[in-house]
Amino acid sequence: MNKIRILSIFGTRPEAIKMCPLVLELRKREQIEPLVCVTGQHREMLDQVLEAFAVRPDFDLDIMKQQQTLTDVTSRAMQGLEQVFAGQKPDMVLVHGDTTTAFAAALAAFYAKLPVGHVEAGLRSFDKYSPYPEEMNRKLISSLADIHFAPTEANAENLRREGVEKNVFITGNTAIDALKYTVDKEYSFTEPALRDIDFSRKLVVLTAHRRENYGAPMENIMDAVRRVARAHRDALFVYPVHLSPYVQETARRLLGSEENIRLVPPLGVIDMHNLMARAYMVMTDSGGLQEEAPALGKPVLVLRSETERPEAVAAGTVKVVGVTTADIVQNAELLLAGGEGYRAMARAVNPYGDGEACGRIADDLLYYFGRSGSPAPDFGKTHK
């Protein structure tokens, strides 16, 4: 019997962190021939993750160019993928989440009449422009996909409300699987700027980079962090600064002179995961960190006005604090004070799974193609 040819497509660092563990799992399945195509939507940051997981792409479109627009990414990815599809004729294309690469790959696969599997399906903020363009990317991918791997029951319910009833499988989030490969109690950091950190201090990990926060929201975030840092000289704030020129300039201007705020280069995935594992708390506008930090027992303050990951908010390990300086300061102060408020968030149950999502997805793919008698057990009702 011929192997099922599964082509996984991704192009950014966050996608790679969540897809590389799945690629490694697919390699274990004798009935599956896994292939990997990267678009290179991000370049250096993507390559760091591929190296960390020892995943070598079969195809690299290398589409990144300076000052690229969303239209550039979409059109260049689709043109490159058209050729890959024609040459490889995969049985299914796997895309992840909500990036422009994922949307372009799903649309290109639809044009080629290839089935699409959507990993991390069903997340919604219900705001067309926030996060932008991610919210519309994931909604459009849901319309194009043939099989949907929802991390949680709430994600599956979002799909049901939109009329997606068939082939929805609840798997957990592959971000949790990735931590099994990366976190090590004896880890030595590769980034020189992290090697002399005193981990006896309260370590606050900060990330802020989203487009919708550019302008006043980003200024507010950094002003708030500066105020909290000045009030808590015993704490150390570590900020891996995104490569965006706007974010770089704003961070240096507002935070660069503070004694207990350390601006460091973007971190490789293993450095970042191990930094969070040693942190006291996390402040972020990222999506992925809202999943990873709770799995490590770290409270998270979300520097956005909404989240497409409400499960962690409901569980109590994540709090959405918005982008107003006073609100950010107030909530950060409460956590840095310790006490029951901090302990409640730190011990809240992670809602994103048990680190076995990749195995469930591989089993569900075999079921979809009729190579298995039943789908993998999941965290809720499975829809066929």
Image (spheres, rainbow, N blue to C red):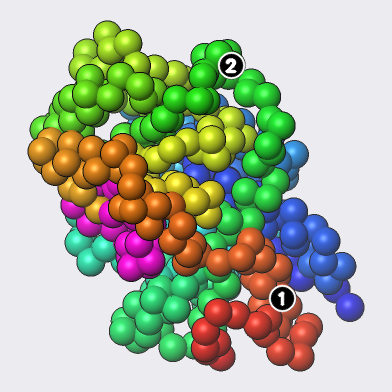
Disc 2 marks which residue? 195
**Closer to the camera, 88 or 194?**
194
Q: Which residues are magenta?
A: 301-319
Q: Residue at image x 20%, y 61%? A: 127
Q: Residue at image x 18%, y 25%? A: 227
Q: Magenta stretch: residue 124 in it?
A: no
Q: Amino acid at mark 1?
A: Asp
Is 373 positioned to the left or the right of 346 in the image? right
Residue 156 position (above or below residue 301): below
Counting from the top left corner in percent of width and height, residue 118 is at 51, 67
Task: Pick the quarter of the image with the C terminus.
Answer: bottom right
Disc 1 marks which residue? 363
Q: Amino acid at mark 2?
A: Arg
Q: Secondary structure at mark 2?
A: loop
Task: Pick the quarter of the image with the N terminus.
Answer: bottom right
**Closer to the camera, 109 or 32?**
32
